[in-house]
Amino acid sequence: MEEYILPTVTINIHGGNVQILPNAAKAEQHFHFASDETHRYGCSLPTRRWAEEDETRLSFYIGNKEDLSAYIATLAACKTAREVGEAVARMCADDPKLTQEQVVKEKFIEVLLPFLTGVGKGKGIDNLRLHINDAWADYKKSRQKK
């Protein structure tokens, strides 16, 4: 009887956080920014092009200040209306104060507009509502599969 020897695999990792997931079908990575930690990770928050009143208006929907800062950074980093929809769906899923009915209302979407500095085309209320609804539907489907 012959003995079968498996080949040896060597993986060298130098610094950083690495996950090796051989059987994973999907992996998600979430970044949470706080003003005192941005320098440590070598990234900077987007330049602030909105007024403090804009943050105050959004704070009516988001209670936690740390979450508010993270959501603003996420919205400012969005490049497309689809990314905005995904960010808002994630906000709705993570924050108990937000409801699906609330995030598609014109009033709420108008509060988001000052933070969408990276989005070029497609910043219309109807287009953003469409992408928020699509992202929320995708989120609900993914939750049902689990």
Image (spheres, grey):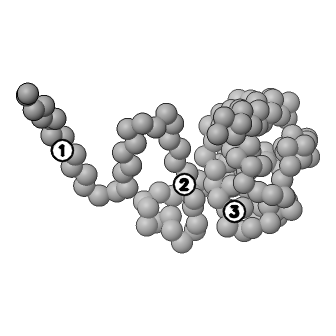
Identity of the residue drawn at 44% across and 61% down: 41
The dot on residue 31 is 2
Which residue carries the number 3 mark? 67
The mark that comes first in sequence, 1 or 3, is: 1
Q: Label for residue 35?
A: none
Q: Nearer the viewer, mark 1 or mark 3?
A: 1
Res. 54 in view: no
86 on left or right of 25: right
Residue found at the very far front of the displayed protein: 1
* Type of amino acid at the residue the image marks with label 1: Thr
What element does badge 3 sit on?
helix
The alpha-carbon separation of the residues under discs 1 and 3 comes to 40 Å
**111 lies above or below 79:** below
Foreground: 42 or 85? 85
The residue labelled by disc 1 is 10
Q: Earlier in the sequence, mark 2 or mark 1?
A: 1
